[in-house]
Image (tube, rainbow, N blue to C red):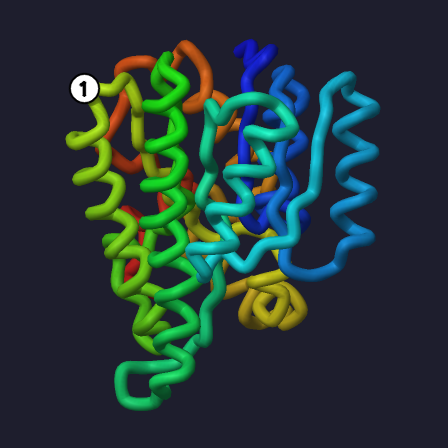
Amino acid sequence: MNLKGKVAIVTGGNSGIGLAIVLELAKQGANIVIDYVAHPEATEALERQVSALGDRAIGVQADVSKIADLQRMIAAAVKAFGRVDIMVNNAGVETRTSVLDTSEAQYEKVLAINLKSAFFGTQLAAQQMIKQGGGGRIINITSVHEDWPMPGNAAYCLSKGGMRMLTRTAGVELAPHGILVVGVGPGAVATPINQSTMSDPALLHKLNAAIPLGRMARPEEIASLVAFLAGDGASYMTATTIFADGGIMQGSPGL
């Protein structure tokens, strides 16, 4: 893989899977726009790590649930680097609430951050890619739960299911422009969003036992897949999701 000269935006880029994606794309030569909403010090540290790899990075504080912030983020990328080649819609949250218990505020927060941001992030990135020419890559970080029910996490599953159809529909619509749209569907990943499970030995044992490979994924393993999809080796892949789940969807009933 070689992304030298490419410009990538990673939403939710200063922690968890997003942080790993930033570093992996930088290792492959890309310049990076790191979107974040909190912990500017973590973003600044990540910028230094990217610089140490010989690439450039800028942090942009933007709430991706707001279209104006997404527009500002795209504009910052173009101002700093002249173009946008890779858009990674990674930002996400969950409430771990059921159909019966989810409040309107919880529903709106999850759908806005997970799905609305991906929709308009895709739209705005694609408009810039078409304007500059040369195609591009849009990579949506979804989940096994775009297809696999998770009782007790209804809004999250709904948002990821929406990302599934966004990926497929946008992939078809944007193909004539040379813009590829692919989803990455992780299973359980060792990130802060799963801290409650990782800190409970009984829950962690139950989860690991349900995964055929016997462990959660490392963020770097998801990031390496994203980097592959951003490169020339994935030039005939679009409108689909690639799952990286350790076999859990095939080996266990829904968790």
Q: Residue at x 77, y 17 (%)?
A: 54
Q: Where, by quadrant of the figure, is residue 33 drawn?
A: top right
Q: Residue at x 60, y 52 (%)?
A: 190
Report the number of numbered marks: 1
Q: Where, by quadrant of the figure, is residue 107 drawn?
A: bottom left
Residue 25 in the image: x percent, y percent?
60, 25
Mark 1 surroundings: few (<14), some (14-19) or many (≥20) residues within 10 A: few
Residue 95 in the image: x percent, y percent?
45, 75
Q: Which residue is mark 1?
A: 176
Given residues 193 and 30, the one toward you in this image is: 30
> What secondary structure is found at the residue carrying circle 1?
helix
Residue 94 in the image: x percent, y percent?
46, 69
Q: Considering the image in quadrants, where does the C terminus appear?
A: bottom left
Q: Residue at x 41, y 10 (%)?
A: 232
Q: Residue at x 18, y 19 (%)?
A: 176
**For residue 209, side relative to residue 26 (left or right):** left
Residue 129 in the image: x percent, y percent?
38, 25
Which amino acid does the dot numbered 1 rest on? Pro
**For residue 240, side relative to residue 153 (left or right):** left
Judge whether 39 appears above or below 24 on screen.
below
Judge whether 228 appears above or below 253 on screen.
above
